[in-house]
C-alpha cells in the first residue's frame, strides 16, 4: 500500500515538532527517515500509526485518508526503539498478539509464530518472558511481532539502536532482505547513516521538523543538499574549508594552502562568491612531495576505523584535515607529508546558506547513481 | 579489612534490633496483656511472668463482659463483622470507581484533568468533622443515616483519593509505547486497558487496595457519628470496654488483637505485591 | 623501555565475601608504560568498569595489588592516588558554570588566574566547548556535558588519567575528529591514560594497547594491530573487528599434496600442503575439527575460486559491505569502492592461507595466524 503525507504539522504546546512534512512512499518501497535526535522522526511514525493525531495535514494509506481511523484499524506493524514488548507475556504471546487480534485459529497462530521465530532464530526462547531475553532476542521478538500481522505498512523506529555492534552489523545485512520479502511499504527510522544507506530505496533527511532532502543513498552521499547533510553522512566527517573561487587560466579554481584546485567550468558564475569547499576524507590521499598540486601538511595522529585508516593532519595554515584510506595501504603515521585532492569529488557550498552549489559534474553523478 | 566489615555487620544488626524492638514493643505488650486478667496487668511493678488465660477472648466471643461488679452485654463479634463488611465493600467500590478514573487521569490528558485529580485528593486535607456535620443532616433527610450504603458512600472519602493517586502513578509508569504496540497490533482501547494496563499496574492496584483497606478498617470518626450500635465497626465498638465500673484492660487487649488480625494477615500476604509494586522494574526493563 | 606508570598484579574483585561472592574481576595483571594509552575493552558486565574503579579507589581491591608511579595504592583513598577521572555519566557540579567546572582542580591547587584561563581556553577549543563555557551544566546537551567532563579531567596534573566511556554520548560527526585531537593532546604531553569502553572503534582509535576483557578475565593485552592480526582466541577474534571476522567450522584432512577443509555444507577448501609450516600442518590434521576465521577485508573476489551467492550488497559511501551465502553460512567481504553486485549474483572468492586464523574449537585458543603455528 502506498503511503503519503501532505503538509503534516504537529506541535506539543508551543514546541513545533513537525513543520509541514510531505512524503510519498510507493507500494513495497522502503523510505528511510534519517536525522539527528529531536528531529521529529519518532513523532512522524506515531502520527502514521495513529496513536497521536496531526494538528494539520493529511496522512493517507493506499489513497485513503487516515483521519479518525483508530490505530488498530490501519493495518500497520511497528517495531519500537525500546522494543516495547509486553513484559507480562511470553515471547510467543508477544509475537502472537497481532494474530489474536485478527481472531485467527489457535493452530494458525501457532504456525505463524513458529514461522517467524524460525526465520529470526528465536524459536528456542518462545516460552521466555521479555526480561529473560537478551537484548538481541528482545529486538528480534519485537521485529517478529511487527511482522506477524502481515501489515501493509511497516514502521521501524530505530530497531537496531539498542543492540550491540556485532548484532547490529549482522542485522544490517539481514534485515533489508527480510523486509523486502514482506512486500510491505516500509518506513525505517535511524540515526546511523550506514543503516540509512544500506536500507533505503530512498532516504528522507529530516531536521528541525522539516524534510531537507529526499533522494537515493547515492544522491544524498554524492550531492548532499547542504553542509548539514554532508556532515551527517560519512565517517570520518567531511572536511569543510572556507574558500572563495577565483578565475584562473584553466577555469575557476579555489586555493587550498596556496595550491590551486581547479573546479568544473560550470562554477564560472561562482567566482568571488564566499563558499565552503567539502572534501570527503576518502577523496584525499597521500602523494609524493613533488606531485602537481601536492599540499604540505603535518600528520598528528593515525587510527584504524572499520577497515580504514584515518589520519588527522594539519595544513601549514593550521587547518585540520581528516583523511581516510583502506586499511593496509601504506601512508605516513606521523610527521610531514603531502596530500593530493581528487578534484572530481570536491563539493562546493554557499557559505551563507550552506546550500550545495551544483556543478554539471555532480548532477551527472547523481543521475547515474 | 574483613574485621572492619564484621564489626560493621554487628553494629548494623544491633541498630536494626533496637529499631524493631522500639516499634514492635507495644504490639508485643498488648499481645501479652490479652492473656492476662486485670489484676496481673495492673501489678506494680509489671512482670513478664504470669499464668496465661483465655477468659478475655472467651468473653469477647460470647459477648458477655464480666466486670468486677456487674455483667455487661457487648456486641464485639458483630462489630468485627461490620468492620469487615464495611472495609471490603468500600474498597471494592473504591477500586471499581478509582482504577478506571486513575487510568483516565494518567493516560488521557484532557482539559482540567489535573485540577479534578487535585480536587479529589484535597478531600483528604479537610478535617473529617468539618464534612461530617452537614453530611449528618443531609443523610438524615434523605434516609441514608445509619445505613450500610450511607457509610460505604462516606468511606469513599477515605479510599477513593488514596486509590486514585497511588494507582495513577502506576499507570503513568507504564511506557506509552507498550500500549501503543498493543493498539497497533490490532487491539482496541478496552482490550488494551484490560490486557496490558491492568496486569502491569496489578501490583500497584493491590498495594492501593491494601492501604485503602487498612485506612477504612481503622476509621473511627465517620462511623462514630453516622452509625448506631448495630452498624458500628470495632473501632467504635471498643468504646464499650470503658465502663462505669472501670476499664477492662485484658479484654481491650484481646479486642485489639482480634481487630488487627485481619489487617495483619492481609499485610503479610500482600507484602510481596507491595515490594513488587514499589519496584516496577519489570515494565521498564 | 619506559617504566611502568601503572602496575596491576593478580587483582581479584569479589562482590560479597572473598572467594564466595560474585567474582567480577579474575586474577587480572597488566602493566602500563609511562606515556601509553591503554583501553579496557569489553561488553557490559565484563569487569572493565570494576577494574577502573579499583584503580581510581572507588572500589576495594579484594586481592592483589595496584601500583601507580611505583607506589602501592590499593589501601589509599581516591584523593591520595593522584589520578584524574572523566565519567561516563553527568558528573559536573551543577551549581557552577562549565568554565568553573573545568578550572576547579587548578583553582584549588592555587594556580595563577591567568594560567588557568589560558589552559581552560586551550582545552575548550580542542573539545569545541568554547561557546558554552559560561553556561550551567543543566542547560547543555549530553554530548557537551561529556566533553566538559573530559576537559575537567584532562586539564589536571595527574599521574594517571582514567576515562570511563568518555565519548558514548558524543555527536557522531564529532567523534572521529575529537578522538584524533584527544590522542594528539595526550601523546604530545606524554600523559598516561586508561580508557574504559565497550566500543572497539574508540579503543582502536585511541589506544596503544587494548586489554580485551570478558567474564572478568583478560583475554588479550596487545596493540590494536596485533589483536587484529593475531587474536589470542576466538572470542577476541570475533569481538574486535568491524565488520566482524567470518567464522566457519571445518573438518581437516590431509592428502599427499593438499590440506583440505571440509565445510558444513559439504563444500571444500583446499590448500597446497606447502602453504602451511610442517608443525602447523600436523597440528591441524591431529585436531581434525577446527574453527576457521578470516577477516572480511581478506576475502577477495577472483575469476575463479569457491562459489558464493550474493545475499546483500550495501554501499556506504566509501566502502561496500557484501554478504554472500557460502558453506551454509554468510561470508562478509569489504571492498573499498562501489561494488556492482546485486542479490543473487554468483561470485567466486579466494582465501589466502596467509589470512587464515585457525582456532581449536574446544578451547577457542588460536592455533595459527597465517602459515605458522602460534608460539
Image (cartoon, coloured by chain):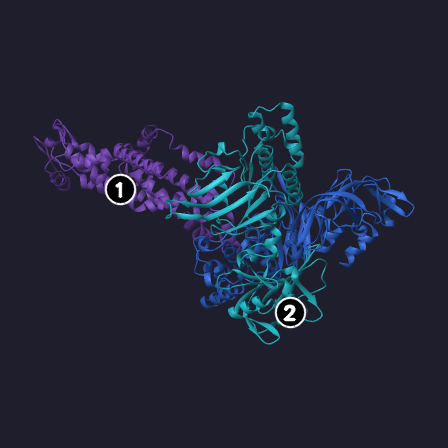
**Image colour assigned to chain B:** purple
Disc sitting over residue C308 in the figure: 2
- Looking at the picture, how far across and down is residue C242, in whole percent? 61, 55
- Of all residues, the one furthest to the right in this rendering is A249
Mark 2 vs mark 1, CA separation in Å: 71 Å
Residue A92 in the image: above or below residue A293? below
Mark 2–mark 1 CB contact (< 8 Å): no
Q: Position of residue C213 (x, y in %)?
A: 51, 50
The colour applied to the residues of chain A in this rendering is blue
Q: Quadrant of the N terminus of chain A?
A: bottom right
Q: Any mark on residue B264, and which? A: 1
Chain letter of mark 2 equals: C
Q: Residue at x 58, y 47 (%)?
A: C209
Chain in cyan? C
Quarter occupied by residue C280: bottom right
Q: Is residue B108 visible?
A: no
Residue B174: image location, x then y, percent: 47, 46
Residue sticking out furthest to the bottom: C256
Amino acid at each position: 500500500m502506498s503511503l503519503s503525507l501532505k503538509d503534516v504539522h504537529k506541535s506539543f504546546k508551543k514546541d513545533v515538532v513537525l513543520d509541514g512534512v510531505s512524503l510519498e512512499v510507493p507500494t513495497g518501497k522502503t523510505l528511510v527517515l534519517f536525522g539527528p535526535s529531536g528531529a521529529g522522526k519518532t513523532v512522524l511514525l506515531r502520527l502514521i500509526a495513529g496513536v497521536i493525531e496531526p494538528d494539520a495535514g493529511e496522512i493517507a494509506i493506499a489513497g485513503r485518508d487516515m483521519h479518525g481511523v483508530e490505530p488498530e484499524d490501519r493495518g500497520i506493524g511497528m517495531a519500537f526503539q525500546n522494543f516495547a514488548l509486553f513484559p507480562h507475556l511470553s515471547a510467543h504471546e508477544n509475537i502472537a498478539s497481532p494474530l489474536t487480534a485478527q481472531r485467527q485459529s489457535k493452530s494458525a497462530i501457532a504456525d505463524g509464530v513458529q514461522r517467524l521465530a524460525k526465520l529470526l532464530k528465536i524459536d528456542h526462547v518462545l516460552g521466555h518472558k521479555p526480561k529473560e531475553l537478551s537484548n538481541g532476542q528482545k529486538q528480534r521478538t519485537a521485529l517478529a511481532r511487527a511482522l506477524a500481522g502481515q501489515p501493509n505498512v511497516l514502521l521501524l523506529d530505530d530497531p537496531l539502536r539498542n543492540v550491540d555492534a556485532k548484532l547490529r552489523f549482522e542485522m544490517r545485512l539481514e534485515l533489508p532482505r527480510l523486509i523486502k520479502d514482506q512486500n510491505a511499504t516500509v518506513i525505517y527510522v535511524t540515526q546511523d547513516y550506514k543503516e540509512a544507506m544500506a536500507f533505503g530505496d530512498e532516504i528522507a533527511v529530516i531536521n528541525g521538523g522539516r524534510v531537507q532532502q529526499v533522494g537515493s543513498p547515492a544522491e544524498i552521499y554524492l550531492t548532499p543538499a547542504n553542509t548539514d547533510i554532508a556532515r551527517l553522512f560519512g565517517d570520518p566527517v567531511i572536511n569543510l574549508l572556507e574558500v572563495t573561487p577565483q578565475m584562473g587560466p584553466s577555469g575557476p579554481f579555489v586555493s587550498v594552502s596556496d595550491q590551486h584546485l581547479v573546479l568544473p567550468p560550470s562554477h564560472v558564475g561562482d567566482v568571488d562568491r564566499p563558499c565552503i569547499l567539502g572534501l570527503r576524507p576518502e577523496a584525499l590521499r597521500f602523494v609524493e612531495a613533488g606531485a602537481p598540486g601536492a599540499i604540505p601538511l603535518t600528520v598528528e595522529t593515525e587510527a584504524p576505523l572499520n577497515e580504514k585508516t584515518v589520519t588527522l593532519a594539519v595544513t601549514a595554515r593550521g587547518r585540520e584535515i581528516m583523511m581516510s584510506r583502506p586499511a593496509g595501504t601504506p601512508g605516513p603515521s606521523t610527521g610531514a607529508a603531502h596530500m593530493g585532492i581528487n578534484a572530481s569529488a570536491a563539493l562546493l557550498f554557499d557559505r551563507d546558506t550552506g546550500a550545495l552549489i551544483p556543478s554539471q559534474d555532480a548532477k551527472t553523478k547523481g543521475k547515474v547513481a | 579489612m574483613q574485621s572492619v566489615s564484621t564489626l560493621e555487620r554487628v553494629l548494623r544488626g544491633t541498630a536494626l534490633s533496637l529499631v524493631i524492638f522500639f516499634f514492635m514493643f507495644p504490639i508485643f505488650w498488648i499481645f501479652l496483656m490479652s492473656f492476662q486478667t486485670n489484676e496481673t496487668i495492673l501489678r506494680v511493678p509489671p512482670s513478664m511472668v504470669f499464668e496465661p488465660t483465655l477468659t478475655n477472648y472467651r468473653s469477647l466471643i460470647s459477648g458477655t463482659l464480666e466486670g468486677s461488679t456487674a455483667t455487661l452485654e457487648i456486641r464485639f463479634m458483630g462489630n468485627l463483622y461490620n468492620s469487615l463488611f464495611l472495609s471490603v465493600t468500600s474498597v471494592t467500590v473504591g477500586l471499581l470507581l478509582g482504577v478506571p478514573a486513575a487510568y483516565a487521569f494518567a493516560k488521557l490528558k484532557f482539559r482540567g484533568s489535573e485540577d479534578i485529580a487535585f480536587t479529589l485528593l484535597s478531600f483528604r486535607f479537610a478535617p473529617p468533622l468539618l464534612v461530617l456535620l452537614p453530611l449528618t443532616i443531609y443523610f438524615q433527610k434523605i434516609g441514608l443515616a445509619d445505613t450500610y450504603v450511607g457509610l460505604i458512600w462516606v468511606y469513599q472519602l477515605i479510599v477513593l483519593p488514596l486509590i486514585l493517586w497511588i494507582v495513577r502513578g502506576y499507570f503513568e509508569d507504564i511506557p506509552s509505547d507498550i500500549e501503543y504496540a498493543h493498539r497497533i497490533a490490532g487491539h482496541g482501547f478496552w482490550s488494551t486497558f484490560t490486557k496490558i494496563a491492568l496486569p502491569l499496574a496489578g501490583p500497584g492496584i493491590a498495594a492501593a487496595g491494601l492501604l485503602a483497606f487498612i485506612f477504612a478498617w481503622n476509621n473511627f470518626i465517620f462511623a462514630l457519628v453516622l452509625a448506631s450500635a448495630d452498624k458500628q465497626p470495632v473501632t467504635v465498638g471498643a468504646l464499650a470496654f470503658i465502663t462505669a465500673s472501670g476499664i477492662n484492660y485484658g479484654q481491650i487487649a484481646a479486642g485489639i488483637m482480634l481487630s488487627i488480625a485481619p489487617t495483619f494477615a492481609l499485610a503479610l500476604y500482600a507484602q510481596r505485591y507491595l515490594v513488587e509494586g514499589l519496584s516496577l522494574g519489570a515494565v521498564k526493563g | 623501555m619506559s617504566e611502568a606508570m601503572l602496575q596491576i598484579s593478580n587483582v581479584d574483585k569479589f562482590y560479597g565475601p572473598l572467594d564466595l561472592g560474585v567474582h567480577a574481576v579474575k586474577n587480572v595483571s597488566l602493566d602500563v608504560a609511562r606515556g601509553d594509552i591503554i583501553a579496557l575493552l569489553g561488553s557490559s558486565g565484563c569487569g572493565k568498569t570494576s577494574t577502573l574503579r579499583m584503580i581510581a579507589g572507588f572500589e576495594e581491591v579484594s586481592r592483589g595489588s595496584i601500583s601507580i608511579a611505583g607506589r602501592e595504592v590499593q589501601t589509599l583513598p581516591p584523593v591520595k592516588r593522584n589520578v584524574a577521572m572523566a565519567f561516563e555519566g553527568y558528573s559536573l557540579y551543577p551549581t557552577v558554570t562549565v568554565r568553573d567546572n573545568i578550572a576547579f582542580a587548578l583553582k584549588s591547587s592555587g594556580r595563577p588566574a591567568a594560567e588557568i584561563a589560558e589552559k581552560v581556553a586551550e582545552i575548550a577549543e580542542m573539545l569545541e566547548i568554547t561557546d558554552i563555557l559560561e553556561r550551567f551544566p543543566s542547560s547543555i546537551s549530553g554530548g557537551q556535558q561529556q566533553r566538559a567532563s573530559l576537559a575537567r579531567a584532562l586539564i589536571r596534573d595527574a599521574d594517571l588519567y582514567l576515562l570511563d566511556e568518555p565519548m558514548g554520548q558524543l555527536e557522531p560527526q564529532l567523534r572521529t575528529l575529537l578522538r584524533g585531537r584527544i590522542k594528539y593532546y595526550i601523546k604530545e604531553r606524554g600523559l598516561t591514560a586508561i580508557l574504559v569502553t565497550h566500543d572497539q572503534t574508540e579503543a582502536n582509535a585511541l589506544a596503544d594497547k587494548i586489554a580485551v576483557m570478558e567474564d572478568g578475565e583478560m583475554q588479550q593485552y596487545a596493540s590494536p594491530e596485533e589483536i587484529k592480526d593475531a587474536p589470542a582466541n576466538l572470542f577476541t577474534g570475533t569481538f574486535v573487528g568491524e565488520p566482524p571476522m567470518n567464522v566457519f567450522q571445518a573438518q581437516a584432512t590431509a592428502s599427499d599434496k593438499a590440506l583440505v577443509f571440509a565445510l558444513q555444507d559439504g563444500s571444500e577448501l583446499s590448500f597446497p600442503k606447502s602453504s602451511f609450516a610442517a608443525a602447523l600442518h600436523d597440528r591441524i590434521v591431529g585436531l581434525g575439527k577446527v574453527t576457521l576465521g578470516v577477516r572480511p577485508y581478506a576475502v577477495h573476489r577472483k575469476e575463479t575460486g569457491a562459489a558464493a551467492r550474493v545475499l546483500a550488497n550495501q554501499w556506504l559511501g566509501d566502502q561496500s559491505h557484501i554478504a554472500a551465502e557460502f558453506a551454509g553460512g554468510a561470508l562478509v567481504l569489504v571492498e573499498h569502492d562501489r561494488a556492482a553486485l546485486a542479490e543473487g549474483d554468483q561470485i567466486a572468492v579466494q582465501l589466502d592461507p596467509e589470512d587464515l586464523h585457525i582456532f581449536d574449537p574446544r578451547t577457542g585458543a588460536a592455533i595459527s595466524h597465517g602459515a605458522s603455528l602460534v608460539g
